[in-house]
Image: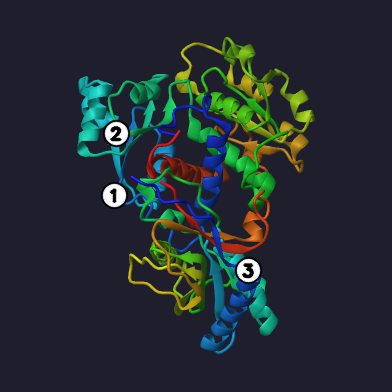
Amino acid sequence: MVQEPVREARTVMSESDIQRVLTRIAHEILEANRGVEDLILLGIPRRGVPLANRLAQKLAEIEPEYVVQERTGQLDITLYRDDLARAESRIPATTMIPPAGVDNTVVVLVDDVLYSGRTIRAALDALADIGRPRTVRLAVLVDRGHRQLPLRADYVGKNLPTASTERVMVQLAEIDGADADYTSDQVQIVDVMD
Amino acid sequence: MRHLLATRNLSYDNAMAILDTAQEMATVSDRSIKKLPTLRGQTVVNLFFEDSTRTRTSFEAAAKRLSADVLNFAVKTSSVSKGESLKDTVQTLEAIGGDAIVMRHWASGAAQQLANFGWSSSAVINAGDGTHEHPTQALLDAFTLRDRIHGQHASGKDLEGLHIVVVGDILHSRVARSNVWLLHTLGAKVTLSGPPTLMPVGVTTWPVEINYDLDALLAEQPDAIMMLRVQAERMSGDFFPSAAEYTRGWGLTNDRYKRIEGCNTLIMHPGPMNRGLEISAAAADSAQNTALEQVANGVSVRMAVLYLLLAGQPGQ
């Protein structure tokens, strides 16, 4: 059998692309919500957290009444996964909910890549155990398709048609900055070698 | 980790994984819905050959918060009293459908035997075996120390540089043994104190210092003193002349308590406390006393252990 040549990693979003996309999503959130009233951003660890924080900064720049510390948090889904029995157990990440809680608010979940949809299903379960938001929305940097559940994102940075043999890699300074191969924020597509 | 049998062979990484996981589990206790779906469909069997309401209830609460089913097997009402062997008991329980066995046994090494003889495929958690080990107690003590000293920034931190004094009946205490090994692994310095008759043979080979003079130790203002319970039920002979004499030498009396009152020295006790014997009422009710936090943290630590053993495929 002839092995297909492995292509080099392709950069599909640069640092400035990510910046622009987050600015657009911030405006879209404000437009749909008609302002920042009752708005809360929850990032999903790991890379959803810095994305949520960056979005929150942008919201605060546009609408100063949005107080970042009181309206931004993170929601860990490790203990709600449906594939726990298939992998070695991992240490859960921290969940931090804004002090006023999520009851009757508009929660925007933020993640880096939307793929099967299973992470978001777990996040909805986790959120339901914490409170009862009025509305839950979803913002993602990249939607790469291949959904296994009937879910969609409300705010999408980039729709990225991919093959399931490819992997989408997101690098963000807050998480990957200390890595030796980190140069700048970017989104890349990498072929998975079996 | 496949089983949790002892802290002596528990690696630094596994110990920290349990403490960091427990940190997240603790936040569940502050929510209105104190339940996670993580271990749905799994069954935890509590198999207690010795009476223990606290440890059993703590494990039961931990399993239930993770949505596992719990079977309580009280040995006094079972066929064990008719002469059934441990092997047959365990295999019967597994046939009923257990995924983990939480066992307390009067024989040192019972949990090890259960895990290593191939009698069952369940994860085994040692909830105390004879005078050998009680690993979850040591883990919850370490968690409590870490929580008191580092607060909400405790995640990822060990006990490097702390000085812990363990006082009392070291000879019969599995809590002391588990604490010695775990505290050593996590970087703390441990000093043992108590009547010389209640120091085990071979204690000089342990990674500890020994000082029979409790007053001198208190003057050093250690980070914590752990007062062990005087275990009358395990003492067949006379190890000290009288209870009053024990209290005078190694009890945390009012007089001793006054000398550390207001200092940073924490007072720990695994419970149940014998007020007036190893600890005075004032020391027991002090804000420096962590006994109740230890109980609450016990649930979080046991949730972490059950999660790490049962949720995923067994790793190293």
For the C terminus of chain B, give its image quadrant: top left
Q: Are marks 2 and 3 on the same chain?
A: no
Q: Secondary structure at mark 1?
A: loop
The vertical placement of B192 against B42, above or below, is above
Using the numbered discs, state the Cα–Cα distance from disc 2 to disc 3 in whole angstroms: 52 Å
Query: At label 2, which amino acid type do we have?
Result: Ala
Is residue A109 shown left or right of residue B92?
A: right
Q: Secondary structure at mark 3?
A: helix
Using the numbered discs, state the Cα–Cα distance from disc 1 to disc 3 in whole angstroms: 37 Å
The spot of residue B29 in percent (x, y) is 49, 55
Q: Camera-side residue: A191 or B222?
A: A191
Using the numbered discs, state the Cα–Cα distance from disc 1 to disc 2 in whole angstroms: 22 Å
Is residue A67 at least partly visible in the picture? no
Q: Answer yes or no: do the residues labelled 1 and 2 have beta carbons within 8 Å? A: no
Which callout, 2 or 3, points to the residue nearer the camera? Answer: 3
Q: Camera-side residue: B316 or B256?
A: B316
Report which residue position mark 1 lands on.
B41
Report which residue position mark 2 lands on.
B74
Which chain is disc 3 placed on? Answer: A
Query: At label 3, which amino acid type do we have?
Result: Asn
Which chain is disc 2 placed on? Answer: B
The spot of residue A181 in percent (x, y) is 64, 51
The vertical placement of B148 against B77, above or below, is below
Q: Are marks 1 and 3 on the same chain?
A: no
Report which residue position mark 3 lands on.
A53
For the N terminus of chain B, give its image quadrant: top left
Residue at 51% of width from left, 87% of height from top?
A: A32
The spot of residue B88 in percent (x, y) is 22, 24
